[in-house]
Amino acid sequence: MKKLKRRRYPAWFRNNVLAPWDHLWAGTLPRYVRDRYIVRFKIRPFQHIDGWLTVTEAAALYRTAAALPPGGVVVEIGSWKGRSTYCLAKGLPAGGVVYAIDPFDASGEAGSAHTYQKRQGETPLLAQFEQRMTALGVMAQIRPLAGYSHQFVGQIPHIDFLFLDGDHSVAGTTADFEQYTPYLAPGGYLALHDYGPDKAEMGPVWVVENLVRPSGVYEHVGTFDSLWLGRKKGS
Ligand SMILES: C[S@@+](CC[C@H](N)C(=O)[O-])C[C@H]1O[C@@H](n2cnc3c(N)ncnc32)[C@H](O)[C@@H]1O
């Protein structure tokens, strides 16, 4: 595994000096500059973790996690080797946690499983995930749940940010949306990866167009490359 250099500040400095700046400059810079700033200074190592997340998507996950209240709870369905998990964990405010749900066995819906199997590597995926997150200093904020999303329904009773990137079939994404959003707090965020006009047959597009938008329950925050981000109304 490639060794990554990491600058570490004490927790009090990160929480009291660095973190408040995130909110001050977030709204003032053009999106392009802001995203590059985030990648350069906050989540640089994410680029060395295998996965499918773009710079714009990574920055959006980081910023959304950073906007959560202290102790915020993120549920990520589909973690792979931790590319998105890392960005979420880095953005979290003090006391926050990311539940990373994945079977960590390179399985998935038809159309994706073959790619996962080809890219998994020799070391077991869960070990790769934990080693990488530990090396990058974010493992304390992460609770890996090794298994399929349906196995953990109801076990996380309060969610501030739900990120769906697991089973991309219509049935799989629908199940994740229906089983997990009842636990998403009012004012909480919902993100789906692989949303876009060129992905019309995939679950995330179907769920956004047929369930999320018609429900009237979510306001659209933005679409960042293929990451659709919404916010549950209320509060
Ligand atoms: C596209 S990858 C996730 C990529 C990751 N978010 C990233 O940024 O690199 C999808 C992952 O979801 C997992 N997966 C597939 N079906 C799942 C399910 N029902 N529950 C949880 N994870 C699932 C796959 O094994 C794979 O590891």
Image (cartoon, rainbow, N blue to C red):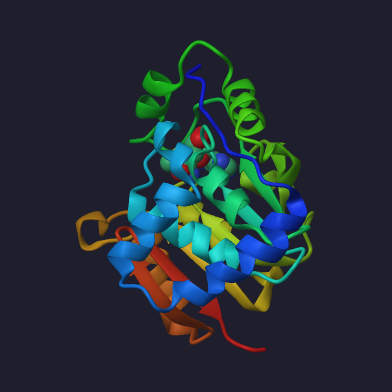
Q: Is residue 35 above or below residue 40?
A: below
Compared across the picture, whether 195 is left or right of 17 comes to: left
How far across and how far down the image is residue 68, in percent? Answer: 64, 69
Is residue 138 visible to us here?
A: yes
Q: Nearer the viewer, residue 100 or 152?
A: 100
57 vs 17, left or right, is left
**Looking at the image, which is closer to me, 166 or 11?**
11
Q: Nearer the viewer, residue 153 or 8?
A: 8
Q: Residue at x 37, y 59 (%)?
A: 35
User: Which of 139/115 is in front?
Assistant: 139
Q: Is residue 91 left or right of residue 25?
A: right
Question: How far across and how far down the image is residue 207, in percent?
Answer: 42, 66
Among all residues in the image, which is located at the extreme left? 198
Q: Quadrant of the C terminus?
A: bottom right
Taking the spot 41% from the left edge, 30% from the top edge, the residue there is 113
Kindly identify the residue that appears in the image at 50 percent across and 10 percent down. 122
Figure check: 40 above or below 135: below
Q: How many marks?
A: 0
Q: Position of residue 60 (x, y in %)?
A: 44, 61
Residue 102 picture quarter:
top right
Residue shown at 41% from the left, 28% from the top:
116
User: Is residue 169 visible in the rendered structure shown here?
Assistant: no
Residue furthest to the top:
122
Point out residue 221 in the picture as x, y percentages from the top left corner: 43, 77
